[in-house]
Amino acid sequence: MPLVVISVLLHRLRLIGSDEFLSAALLAGLVATAAALAGMIALARLWQSGDRGWGKALLGLLLGLICLAPFAWYGNLALKYPPVTDIATTTRDGLPLVFEPGTASMPPPKMLGKAQAAVVFPNVETRRYPLGQAQTFAIVEQMIAGNDWDVRLVHAPDAMLDPASINAQIVTLPGWREEVVIRVTGDATMSVVDMRSVSLNAPHDFGSNGQRIERFLSDLDGAVTTLLRDNPNINAPEPEPAEAVPVT
């Protein structure tokens, strides 16, 4: 159990690298497996001999199984999701990372083909809303703040209607770092939202990037729908002031 907990804490605090964390996690899994096997062997021998020591054998088995639970969970995810580290709703050219690919400490990205991505993550799709770019971007900012993501770079909407974007970083429970890029384009009456989620230092994201995009865009759909429902004239142009009629 200390091997599992300490290795995760050191990885989250960046006191050990990804390679060291994987080695420590593998060692922890082996020790937990040995503990569980020893507990089962002890229980079998106690069943035959009728000797004392059931409590210690059960405790050893229980602690071993508890430490193996995360490995079973991630093993199930590895079977469910293909090995991928980079998911996006569109081409990556328009969704650059702050932590740029190609540097020595970032492994090459693993991506899905368009057909495979549509099967595994069917809701990872570009969103189009009948809502102005600035208003949609404001909702995106609020949602990112609500998720407590670490914002690294912001390109806010401007009068030229250039693409607006936000880069944020997320630390997963085991300490893997993942970056999100959200881009909002459009004009005063419509907007287009694209999103990318990338694992920066993991060999397998276990579905986290695709799930994050699907969940975020689904919540964004709901937030935009609610805003439009409560403000049906939000995109209506402001009426021009009436010309003064001269008094005769």
Image (spheres, rainbow, N blue to C red):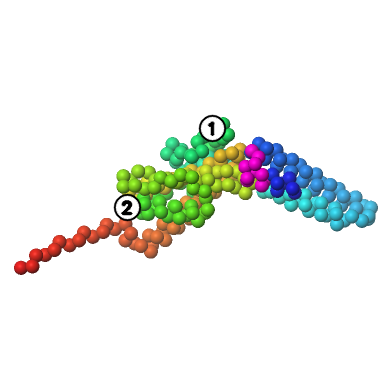
Question: What secondary structure is marked by label 1?
Answer: loop
What's the residue at 92%, 56% (across, down)? 52
Q: Which residue is rendered at x = 31% and y = 44% of the image?
A: 160
Q: Is residue 14 located in the magenta-colored stretch of the structure?
A: yes
Per the image, the residue denoted by label 2 is 189
Q: Is residue 39 left or right of residue 106?
A: right
Q: Which mark is residue 49?
A: none
| Amino acid, disc 1 | Thr
| Mark 1 surroundings: few (<14), some (14-19) or many (≥20) residues within 10 A | few
Residue 155 seen in this snapshot: yes
Work out how far the residue at label 1 is from the one at label 2, CA to CA, in angstroms. Answer: 40 Å
Is residue 237 magenta-colored? no
Front-lying residue, 6 or 73: 6
Give the x, y percent position of residue 29: 74, 43
SS under mark 2: loop
* Side of 231 where 67 appears, left or right: right
Asked whether the viewer can see residue 116, the reply is no
Q: How many labels sit on residues?
A: 2
- Circle 2: residue type: Thr
Q: Which residue does the numbered mark 1 point to in the structure image?
A: 103
The percent position of residue 167, horizontal first and vertical second, equals 47, 44
Sequence-first tag of 1 and 2: 1
Viewer-nearest of discs 1 and 2:
1
Residue 19 sits above or below residue 225 on the image:
above
Q: Residue 99, percent across and down?
A: 51, 38
Segment tinted magenta in the rendering: 8-17
